[in-house]
Image (tube, grey):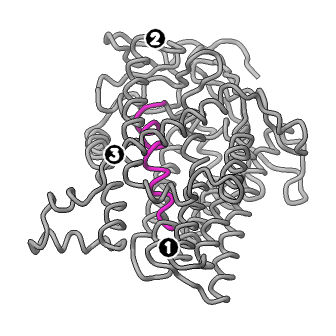
């Protein structure tokens, strides 16, 4: 609840160099040399990293070292590799344009109806968290509906209508990569221009004075077109995450076409990742209160990342299994399934405990007991003082980010399903470990600035981030 205004909030630079009032959370206000170097490195090399992985599968059967060895020994040149790379095609452009347009249509023009008949599902018009400037945005939550409609049409096509082959995504995988890159850069560039010239909320912008950092991390907090089209919610959830399970299904169809059967490892990857995707859309309202929506601004990091990085690198396990079909022994398959399910349980229950605590204002039971919490306060950019509580019971008393621990267990299960033949499918667990550890540090730095001494009391009560006794 808000109380009387507090004065002299922190200030940041505006585009004309003057100071603007800002809140105590969100992306950075000033950029140190290491952050700037990291930003420039990612802007330059992230697209090539994605290309390298996909090219390695297409030309080198998913070996990450063979292309380097071939180039170093002079067997091939970069020009030779590029010449073998499929270019963008008219078919890919048409497919991608149709795909994105269809998802925009489902997002913008079809109000949610799933919440009317699915018990426990929260959809329709929902409110997000308070922004740094004190704004509360409203969202049309209809991601589950979009996912169901999209997959219903996919299965109708695969088994009844035969409009296109279920392998269509795999068959156009690299040409579609170029389309995804074009959209990612167009959206990111538009978002930056919009942030300068016609922002949705002037007060929820941040400028560092550095072009590269502003471009990557974003200027606007919640860029929108019209009342409902929110860039962050759309690109975080659609088209990338809706596509995730379709991509895996296309890979499974290709495996069936090439070998006459689908391996148990491919089934495991499809099932475990589908659980994660469905969890995302079932809890899309909860997602409005997470770091992606609550604290990240919309720039290249989210715009390009959701269009390219997510659909192309999060699906490497399924792609690998097209080239290397792995049939796991029953004990190994069961063990990997259990690891994935236990990881998902920890991930979901940890988040559920926090959500339950928030919704009931602590008037609930966690692990059969009344939850404990640390009272804290923070000030938003409009000078209003807000009060909050930091949960220290249940999984949140085990570690400060135990939901990430469950997420990493599930990520490891996806990779283990691919066996030990190549490093490529293990990129996901390596990347997720780096991402979530960095997110822990970034989130805690933000919380330390936001809550001050209250955060010190919280870290004293829950001393570990991810692994009790270790980290």
Residue 444 in the image: state x and y as whole percent: 53, 45
Camera-side residue: 271 or 441?
271
Residue 414 in the image: state x and y as whole percent: 57, 69
Magenta-drawn stretch contains 323: no
Secondary structure of the residue carrying tag 2 is: loop
Reply above or below: 57 against 352: below
Disc 3 crowd, CA 10 A, few/some/many (<14, 14-19, 20+): some
Q: Is residue 90 left or right of residue 288?
A: left
Q: Give the residue number, with chain letter if any, for mark 1.
A: 321
Reply above or below: 408 against 321: above
Magenta-highlighted residues: 298-317
Residue, x 63% and y 40% (percent of image)?
290
Q: Give the residue number, with chain letter if any, for mark 3.
A: 88
Which numbered mark, 3 or 1, is in the foreground of this view?
3
- Magenta: main secondary structure: helix
Residue 394 in the image: state x and y as whole percent: 77, 58
């Amino acid at each position: 609840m808000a109380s009387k205004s507090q004065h002299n909030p922190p200030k940041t630079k505006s585009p004309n160099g003057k100071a603007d009032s800002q809140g105590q959370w969100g992306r950075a206000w000033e950029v140190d040399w290491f952050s700037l170097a990291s930003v420039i490195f990612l802007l330059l090399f992230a697209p090539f990293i994605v290309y390298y992985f996909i090219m390695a599968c297409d030309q080198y059967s998913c070996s990450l070292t063979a292309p380097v060895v071939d180039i170093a020994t002079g067997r091939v040149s970069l020009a030779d590799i590029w010449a073998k790379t499929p270019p963008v095609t008219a078919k890919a452009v048409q497919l991608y344009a149709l795909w994105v347009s269809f998802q925009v249509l489902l997002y913008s023009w079809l109000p949610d109806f799933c919440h009317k008949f699915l018990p426990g599902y929260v959809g329709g018009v929902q409110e997000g968290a308070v922004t740094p400037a004190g704004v509360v945005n409203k969202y049309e939550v209809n991601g589950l509906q979009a996912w169901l409609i999209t997959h219903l049409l996919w299965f109708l096509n695969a088994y009844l209508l035969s409009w296109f082959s279920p392998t269509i995504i795999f068959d156009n995988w690299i040409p579609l990569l170029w389309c995804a890159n074009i959209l990612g850069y167009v959206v990111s560039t538009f978002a930056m221009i919009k942030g300068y010239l016609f922002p949705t909320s002037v007060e929820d912008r941040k400028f560092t004075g550095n072009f590269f950092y502003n471009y990557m991390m974003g200027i606007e907090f919640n860029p929108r077109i019209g009342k409902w089209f929110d860039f962050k919610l759309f690109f975080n959830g659609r088209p990338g995450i809706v596509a995730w399970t379709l991509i895996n299904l296309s890979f499974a169809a290709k495996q069936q076409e090439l070998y006459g059967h689908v391996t148990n490892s491919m089934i495991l990857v499809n099932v475990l990742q589908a659980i994660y995707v469905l969890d995302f859309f079932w809890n899309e309202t909860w997602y409005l209160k997470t770091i992606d929506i609550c604290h990240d601004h919309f720039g290249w990091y989210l715009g390009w990342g959701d269009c390219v990085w997510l659909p192309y690198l999060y699906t490497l396990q399924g792609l690998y299994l097209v080239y290397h079909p792995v049939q796991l022994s029953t004990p190994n398959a069961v063990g990997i399934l259990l690891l994935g399910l236990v990881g998902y349980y920890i991930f979901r229950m940890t988040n559920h405990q926090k959500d339950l605590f928030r919704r009931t204002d602590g008037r609930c039971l966690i692990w059969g007991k009344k939850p404990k919490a640390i009272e804290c306060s923070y000030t938003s950019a409009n000078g209003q003082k807000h009060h909050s509580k930091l949960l220290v019971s249940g999984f949140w008393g085990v570690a400060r980010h135990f939901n990430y621990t469950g997420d990493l267990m599930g990520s490891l299960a996806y990779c283990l399903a691919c066996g030990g033949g190549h490093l490529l499918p293990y990129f996901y667990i390596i990347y997720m470990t780096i991402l979530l550890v960095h997110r822990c540090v970034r989130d805690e730095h933000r919380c330390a600035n936001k809550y001050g001494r209250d955060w010190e009391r919280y870290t004293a009560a829950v001393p570990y981030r991810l692994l009790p006794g270790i980290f």
